[in-house]
Image (tube, rainbow, N blue to C red):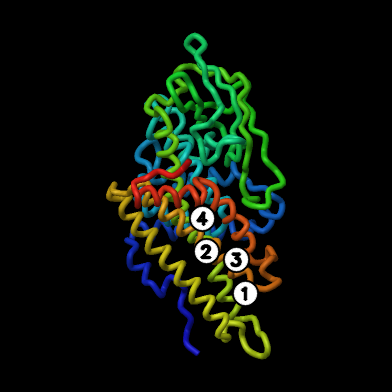
Amino acid sequence: MTDPQPPLGLFGTEELIDGDDRAIRDAVRDFVRDRVRPQLPDWFEQARIPARELARELGELGVLGMHLEGYGCAGTSATAYGLACLELEAADSGLRSLVSVQGSLAMFAIWRWGSEEQKEEWLPRMASGKAIGCFGLTEPDFGSNPAGMRTRARRDGDDWIVDGTKMWITNGSVAEVAVVWARTEEGIRGFVVPTDTPGFSAPEITKKLSLRASVTSELVLDGVRLPSSAMLPGARGLSGPLSCLNEARFGIVFGALGAARDCLETTIEYSRNREIFGKPLAAYQATQLKLADMALELGKGMLLALHLGRLKDAHRLRPEQVSLGKLNNVREALGIARECRTLLGANGISLEYPVMRHANNLESVLTYEGTSEVHQLVVGQALTGHGAFR
């Protein structure tokens, strides 16, 4: 018998990560190990998470909007941000969602498209975790087709009046600010909406079977009156929200691998200690064939993620490449979680092990920030030059 190697050790990916990025990753890994992992089974079972408390701790750690420059943000590399997402999702997809919605959706929207006044007002507080943000794009009847949104904003003197409903909004019920996208006579525009504005409410969505350690909400805007300064001046049309989604998808490319790695490492350890018919489960050919295939997909996904990270750091990453990463890595991560569940047998459904929790969460990750079918069509259009979304 030889000493076992970690799955990613087979690929030598550690050598592809520079010292600064590795130090950031390790700090996030330590935080997750010490602060989050012991609580996760209870949070998932009870469908709750101390989001505001965690946001402040994550702000102190420097991961909220970490890849943005200025306004209290850490200004790290995109690769470091991806590696942080990997470690957060190795704990739970809900934790990574809290961070990516805060930094890559709400903060990025203000940082990229907002006025200087909006940036100064919100970004330092959001980077520190003293203010939580959410991102209101998806509606009850319009997910993959955001161009069909029904939320509307109309002028009333110098103000805007916003009416509509958003659905499946991470952080909504605990947010101090919402970036809300609405249809106007000028096309689709974004608005920075303090959540204490009269007419705004965010009832929490309950009875979820996935992302239970996460706050998911509906946003209701009933005659919400906003000053003209609430509009994001730089965003016109769907290019604004879609640019934010690409930021979040990039984090998922790495994050999904964290869930897959946690499942695979848990299963390898379990198989080495679980005896069946007088020898370890790990010593059977059928087990090793499954583990080898899963390690292969995990490693390929990691190589792809690191390559995309380098492209993003060089400002050469294209949207269809993000779709490639999201499509492949989430799909393979979910396959790994499901296969690991089978190797754990009945123990695979217990919260004593993270595998079924990851599998349930990844069902949501497969769907949000663009379904697999949407990303297949993005890739298909890149290959053929023909759009086939309708």
Measured in 3D between alpha carbons, the distance from the residue under mark 2 to the one under mark 4, in whole angstroms, is 12 Å
Label 4 is placed on what type of residue?
A: Leu
Question: Badge 2: few (under 14), some or many (20 or more) residues near its Cα, within 10 Å?
Answer: many
Check contact, mark 2 vs mark 4: CB within 8 A. no
Earlier-in-chain disc, 2 versus 3: 2
Give the number of the disc on residue 338. 3
Q: What element carries label 3?
A: helix
x and y, in percent, of residue 184 in the image: 48, 21
Measured in 3D between alpha carbons, the distance from the residue under mark 2 to the one under mark 3, in whole angstroms, is 10 Å
The mark lying in front, picked from 1 and 4, is 1
Q: Within the image, what quadrant is residue 161 found in?
A: top right
Question: Badge 1: few (under 14), some or many (20 or more) residues near its Cα, within 10 Å?
Answer: many
x and y, in percent, of residue 198 in the image: 62, 20
Can residue 131 be seen at all in this image of the molecule?
A: no
Residue drawn at the location 46% of the way across and 43% of the way down: 389
Earlier-in-chain disc, 1 versus 3: 3
Give the number of the disc on residue 88. 4
Label 2 is placed on what type of residue?
A: Ala
Check contact, mark 1 vs mark 2: CB within 8 A. no
x and y, in percent, of residue 54 in the image: 57, 47
x and y, in percent, of residue 362 in the image: 57, 56
* Mark 1 lies on residue: 343
Earlier-in-chain disc, 2 versus 4: 4
Measured in 3D between alpha carbons, the distance from the residue under mark 1 to the one under mark 3, in whole angstroms, is 9 Å
Question: Badge 4: few (under 14), some or many (20 or more) residues near its Cα, within 10 Å?
Answer: many
Residue drawn at the location 34% of the way across and 62% of the way down: 17
Check contact, mark 1 vs mark 3: CB within 8 A. no
Earlier-in-chain disc, 4 versus 3: 4
Residue in the foreground of this view, choosing between 359 and 265: 359
Residue in the foreground of this view, choosing between 283 and 82: 283
